[in-house]
């Protein structure tokens, strides 16, 4: 720890370089969901909103609003999503603005 402290004081660097190679085991980490509009119906969207334990999903008319800042990547929506939801594979999410973590997915499936 002292090494990093003195290095930061001497060079003005407070973090290290991001690794060039990501370890293979990271592919097994749970990741936030990716939604496929064409397969997403209002009925399915309402079901997914109801089963999300983190409250990361809400519905506004014909849009599913996904709050990636609240999503815990539990995988329940992927299990219940009937192909309309799949793991995104993206585990590096960050933003300096909260609104960038809110994603709006249009519901293009049947109206039921």
Image: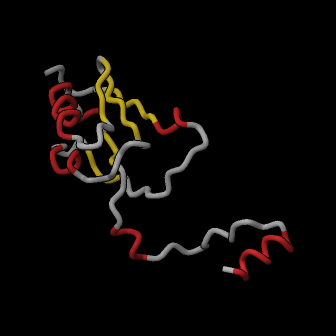
Task: Report the front residue among 1 and 80.
Answer: 1
Q: Would you say 92 lies left or right of 42 here? A: right
- Seen at 58% across and 37% down, the residue is 97
Task: Report the front residue among 3 and 95.
Answer: 3
Q: Is residue 26 above or below residue 97?
A: below
Task: Report the front residue among 72 and 82.
Answer: 72
Q: Would you say 66 lies left or right of 46 here? A: right
Residue pushed farthest front?
Answer: 2
Q: Where residue 21 sits: x, y (%)?
A: 56, 75
- Seen at 40% across and 30% down, the residue is 104
- Seen at 74% across and 74% down, the residue is 5
Quadrant the C terminus occupies: top left
Q: Would you say 3 lies left or right of 79 here? A: right
Task: Report the front residue among 72 and 60.
Answer: 72
Q: Would you say 61 lies left or right of 51 here? A: right
Residue pushed farthest right?
Answer: 10
- In the rendered image, which quarter is residue 77 located in? top left
């Amino acid at each position: 720890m002292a090494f990093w402290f003195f290095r930061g004081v001497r060079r003005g660097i407070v973090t290290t370089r991001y690794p060039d190679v990501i370890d293979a085991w990271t592919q097994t980490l749970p990741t936030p969901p990716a939604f496929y509009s064409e397969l997403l119906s209002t009925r399915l969207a309402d079901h997914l909103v109801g089963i999300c334990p983190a409250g990361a999903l809400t519905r506004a008319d014909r849009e599913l609003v996904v709050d990636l800042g609240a999503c815990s990547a539990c995988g329940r929506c992927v299990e219940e999503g009937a192909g309309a939801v799949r793991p995104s594979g993206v585990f590096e999410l960050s933003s300096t603005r909260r609104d960038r973590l809110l994603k709006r997915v249009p519901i293009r499936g049947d109206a039921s």
